[in-house]
Amino acid sequence: MKLPTPHTLLLSAVIGAIAVPISACARSDDGFTDEQQQHIGEIAAKYIVDHPEVLQQASQRLQQQQQDQATQQLREGALQQQDALLHDKSTPSVGPQDAKVAVVEFFDYQCIYCAHTAPELEKTMKAHPEARYVFKEFPVFGQRWPASTQAALTGLSIYKEKGAQAYLNYHNSVFGTGKNEGKLQQSDIQSIAAKSGVTSQQINANRAGAEQSLNDTMELAQKLGVMGTPTLVVMPVEGANADNVTVIPGAADSDTLSAAIQKAAD
């Protein structure tokens, strides 16, 4: 059986996983001849063929290591960028201004995983009204689906003109359409925006400021190492450290969010 050539990182993980069987073939303090190296390679290849589960285990281990590294980078970034995360006045936020805990979400209205998280976050907001919820409009699918960017710009305009509750109603209503992955249309956005009492003229007048807000969020996401949507950061507004900040790079349910809020509050 001819094995496919593995990715370099995966190969490293595989070699680590099978180091014990190989180490029995030669002493680590001696150099290997070409013949010995070839023999070791044959043993390794045969071991993988006989134990294909090693590849899966190595792949899972590698993915977990990469996930842990990304989460650590996000946590460190959140600690360094607390002011931009929590106190940008152009960023929509809902909840007490003197809240001790903040939940920050980077999201895109066309992201299906954001759509899964939206009702869970809404449930969390009802269970924890003492926290402040910060919504970072992050339309990463904007080039592919223009409605993604338009929905974000409209949301920022509604927040500026009508405040937090009108924004939250708009936010939940857009996700409530069930239209994501390119299905959201301009007409959907306009219809929902009209219910908030914001006119198209107001939206156009606020466009420059809203675009600047999106650019600022894009720059912040790069500094934090945000790789996709949704990404959530739950942290105390004051006294944040590596032990009380929770980073969730992906969809989250209300139980996970509640636990993170409690951790930040302790």
Image: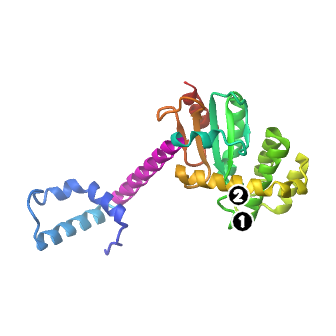
Check whether the beta carbons of the residues at disc 1 and disc 2 lie within 8 A of each other. yes
Tell me if residue 120 is in the magenta stretch.
no
- Whether residue 124 is visible here, answered yes or no, is no
Where residue 148 sits, quadrant-wise, is bottom right
Q: Please give the label number shown on residue 145.
A: 1
Residue placed most toward the observer, 27 or 24: 27
Q: Residue 183 appears at what percent x and percent y?
A: 76, 62
Q: How far is the residue under mark 1 from the one under mark 2?
A: 8 Å
Along the horizontal axis of the image, is 226 left or right of 90?
A: left
- Whether residue 158 is visible here, answered yes or no, is yes
Instruction: Give the SS element for disc 1.
Output: loop
Where residue 260 sits, quadrant-wise, is top right
Segment tinted magenta in the rendering: 53-78
Q: Amino acid at mark 1?
A: Trp
Q: Residue 261 appears at what percent x and percent y?
A: 60, 31
Quadrant of the drawing holding the C terminus: top right
Residue placed most toward the observer, 86 or 41: 86
Along the horizontal axis of the image, is 32 left or right of 260?
A: left
Mark 2: give few (<14), some (14-19) or many (20+) Cα within 10 Å.
many
Say above or below: 41 vs 101.
below
Q: Residue 112 appears at what percent x and percent y?
A: 67, 55
- Rendered residue at 61%/53% (across/down): 229
- Rendered residue at 38%/52% (across/down): 61
- Rendered residue at 36%/68% (across/down): 6
Q: Amino acid at mark 2?
A: Gln
Say above or below: 16 vs 234.
below
Q: Please give the label number shown on residue 110.
A: 2
Residue placed most toward the observer, 259 or 210: 210
